[in-house]
Image (spheres, rainbow, N blue to C red):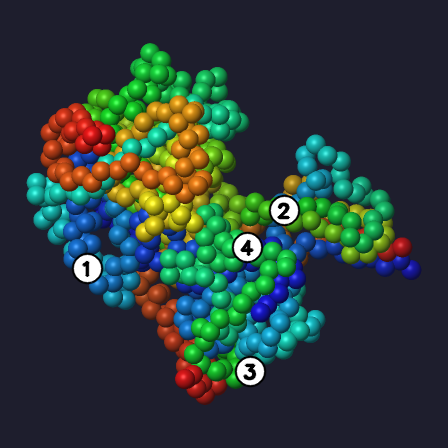
Amino acid sequence: MANQKSVLSPIPGVFYRKPAPDKEEYVKEGGNVKAGDVIGLVEVMKSFYEIKAENDGVLAQYFVENEDLIDAGQEVAVIIEQ
Amino acid sequence: MIKVNSPGLQTTVQDFGRIGYYEVGMPPSGVMDKYSYIAGNLLVGNKENAAVLEITYMGPVLEFQQDAVIAVTGGVMQPKINDRPVGMWETLQVKTGDVLSFDFIKQGARVYLAVAGGIDVPLVMDSRATYTLCGIGGYEGRPLQAGDVLKIGTENETDIAVGTRISDHLIPTFSKHHEVRVIVGLCSYRLTEESKERFFSIDWTVTPEANRVGYRFKGERLNFVEREQPFGAGSNPSNVVDLGYPIGSIQVPDGVEPIALLNDAVTGGGYATICTIISTDLDKMAQIKTNDKVRFVAVDINEALEIRKEYQNKIQQIKEQIIRQAGGVQNG
Amino acid sequence: MSRYEYGGDEFIFVELSEAMSLEINFQAMAITRTLREEKVPGILDICPSNASYMVRFNPEVIHPDTLIAKLKELEEEVSLENFEITARAVDVPILFEDPWTHEALMRFRDRHQDPSSTDLEYVARTNGFQSKEELIKAITDSPYLVSMIGFVPGLPWCYQMVPNEQQIEAPKYVRPRTFTPERAFGFGGAFAVIYPVQGAGGYQLFGTAAAPIFEKEQRLYDFKESMTFPRQGDVFRYRSISMDEYEDIRKQVENGEFRYLTKDITFKPQDVLENPKAFSESVLRRLYA
């Protein structure tokens, strides 16, 4: 059975799914990720923090939209371990 | 020595701040939540103005290269020594080689790490506080970076027994909905009566632009009384002839998005200020996060002074508790 | 009518006038200077500003209402007639239309009243000058009173010592810039300023000062006692310089040899108010003698 792992944002701020407005999304839903891959960016206090996958697997779903305001500890995505 | 393995999001060295230089445009900097700061220093037996680390949103990973006595206070962010959870608001012992790390922030926004002896960085204008805009004070005038090594000072005067703890009723709790008390005044005559009323009757949302300089809020547009602008003020109705901004004052540039000015803020400028957060509630501001809701509540000067007294009574209670529990001995 | 206001429980803010004038600024200077001399216990900061002033205090030592009563008394007592200001006249070299502020102001055209011209061209036009050269001449012909310090460490608000009808006025940007180069020379409301450090700003940008007004390393002669150079009451003369002179001054700054040309002066507000032109001329004569 595949394990589901939540990806949480440790900080509040604005969530981005791409590194810059004119760039591709880090990962598409259903895409493969490796531990350490960046899956999103959070902007707060004029600085950016990268959210990384903690395990290998498939990024099954994002729970927040690009540019959504998120809280600290909020679940932003789920990864199904392979 | 303390080695910074990872710095967290924004971790700075702070103390009570740089007082007495406001007239040359130097903001005080210093800790944003003074209550947690004072409690932390008391728990490790430090002198009143010893420097601590102010941690914002995300904790650092710190490796102690000597034995030390520490305390973690402020917002709720589970501290761990060698991955083992330890208490906040409590005197803790760390040994050479121990690694201090933190979990996600659960409540509040800022956490304080006090170390017996204080963080030793050079005094700049009588303070160790970091003011990043000008690169003054603290550790090389900037937030900590991985690889930095902090020296522990000699700003302690009492030995506090490990395990000393502040009782629960003196530990503040933080929600996501805050009441912040202000005194209306300064240039509040510039706002229409209706906007003044609206300012106090809606929930304001904290934007991602919320840091040691100031907090910006989203809500509704506020309107200014129409007038012919006085000479030298500038053309926008929210402009006034450039004046001094009290710490904690709130302005509304162009009527859009109020800004509360905090420890590292500009000391003056050309926007009408409409009220000032009372000193005790500046501590609350420190623990307010992006996305939290804030309701402003107007109090008068006598109420503010009364609240100030209650706050100081609480600090007095902390002092007495610690002395009682630890049977502290004066050094020297 | 002056307004006395609580700025929370630690500040008193006193607005002497809603409009700027030399007379009001001198009055704020006289009141705050007297307050300073009286060494009232519990006062932490005394911050004179353009047409107002602010006092930070410890309410455990002095009750805010006691302090307000004291300040009202001072307002009654203090007279400009026997008030004397000892300050410095300073030569402040400015490179107008420099490449650095030009780059910055072009980057933020969408935040400006007139995206199609430069800040200098815009302010020349709105103040009725035939050309930007005429505006530069008006800015540099008469010296300025440093009427307030603040915003960031050492930023001087400078108010020109000319009759009211000759005052230059400029609106601030519609939305402030997120970037202003260090040492930018700007104009907003009725004030000329130098930005001590890089940062946000809303004033119209005209040029760059060759020498610093803030130096945290405190290497230069003028910064031995303080990281900030300007003091309220100083008289600044902004002098237009060439790129050659600019580069020469930059070299002197870098090797630690630069020193501002200054002369100590003593004057009475009455002298300035009665005949600003004569006062300005006498200051310039003394400065460049």
Q: CA distance from mark 2 to mark 1?
A: 47 Å
Q: Are marks 3 and 2 on the same chain?
A: no
Percent position of residue C252, x then y = 41, 37
> In the image, what residue occupies the spot 34% across and 45% down?
C221
Judging from the image, mark 3 belongs to the subunit labelled B
* Element type where label 3 sits in the image: loop
> In the image, what residue occupies the spot 64% across and 64% down?
B61
Classify mark 4: residues with Cα within 10 Å, few (<14), some (14-19) or many (20+): many
Dots 2 and 1: beta carbons under 8 Å? no
Three-letter amino acid code at disc 1?
Lys
Q: CA distance from mark 3 to mark 2?
A: 38 Å
Percent position of residue C189, x then y = 32, 30
Give the camera-side residue of B219 and A80: A80
Judging from the image, mark 2 belongs to the subunit labelled A
Judging from the image, mark 4 belongs to the subunit labelled B
Label for residue C18?
none
Question: C64 left or right of B84?
Answer: left
Dots 1 and 4: beta carbons under 8 Å? no
Q: Would you name the residue on which mark 3 appears? A: B162
Q: Nearer the viewer, mark 2 or mark 4?
A: 4
